[in-house]
Image (cartoon, rainbow, N blue to C red):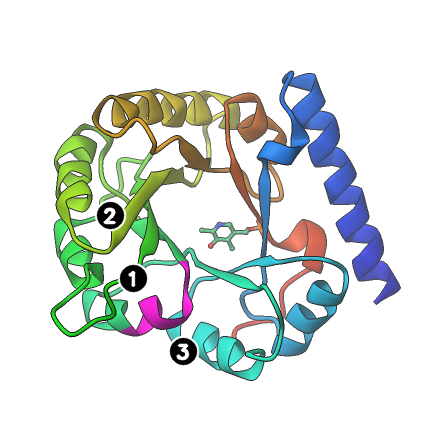
Amino acid sequence: MPELAERLAAVRAEIADAARAASRDPDELTTIVVTKFHPAELVRELHALGVRDVGENRHQEALAKASALADLDGLTWHFIGQLQSNKARQVRRYSHIVHSVDRPALVDALARRDGDPLDETTEIFLQLNLTDDVGRGGVTPDALEPLAERALAAPGLRVRGVMAVAPLGEEPRAAFARVRAASDRLRLLAPDARAISAGMSGDFRAAILEGATHLRIGTAITGSRPTAR
Ligand SMILES: *Cc1c(COP(=O)(O)O)cnc(C)c1O
């Protein structure tokens, strides 16, 4: 516990420092603590330390944790992993925000259907694939606009912005500059979709310099992950 608190404080301080170096207000950054593979108990400890945004990448695991922790106030679950369309409605029930929307079929699966509560909105990020590997999650940057148009027209979805993971073997700042350029293009279609979900334990500083608003940070805060359970 003390180690967790220390790591969290150290990362928060680094984020504030990087924000100031980029002439940005640290308060405009949301830090999502990625808790994948860790037990629900770790999320409870993080909540006690003031964390309110947590990220998970696998549906079964996320559902189990969200159910076990339903008593915690004010927790927002961010779904950040590749998502099968046939799991989308289930994920929407406990995740407030889905960061990994990368194809029309997933937009359609997340959209509100007849019979759903009318006031239910799911916030989404459109995930970009910055690699040449089509097996990686994300839409190729040149297919961003059609995907955005579909998402903007879908009932019950609110497009917050773009999301990306920096590829291995490229300087992260250069990769995040490409994300910023894609964000600028998205804003021509959707002026409110200003958010940028980018930056992990090893590269959040570069992401902040390129305009990231939502950082997804795991190991720098949680320590190394247990192997998959
Ligand atoms: C696991 C994961 C992270 C966090 O990675 P760390 O290197 O542990 O900070 C961020 N984003 C996505 C999409 C992830 O799957």
Name the residue tied to disc 2. Answer: 102
Name the residue tied to disc 3. Answer: 60
The amino acid at mark 1 is: Asp
Q: Which mark is residue 119?
A: 1
Residue located 31% across and 38% down the image: 128
Q: Nearer the viewer, residue 217 or 63?
A: 63
Determine whether 179 is above or below 29 in the image. Answer: above
Give percent across and percent down for residue 152: 19, 41
Q: Earlier in the sequence, mark 1 or mark 2?
A: 2
Q: Earlier in the sequence, mark 2 or mark 3?
A: 3
Residue located 50% across and 31% down the image: 212
Counting labels gives 3
Q: Residues within 10 Å of mark 2 (few under 14, many from 20)?
A: many
Q: Nearer the viewer, mark 1 or mark 2?
A: 1
Left or right: 62 with respect to 28? left
Give percent across and percent down for residue 6: 84, 53
The amino acid at mark 3 is: Gln
Left or right: 217 with respect to 184? right
Label 1, label 2: how far apart the Cα atoms are: 24 Å
The amino acid at mark 2 is: Asp
Q: Which residues are magenta?
A: 90-96
Element type at mark 3: helix
Label 2, label 3: how far apart the Cα atoms are: 20 Å
Give percent across and percent down for residue 51: 67, 57
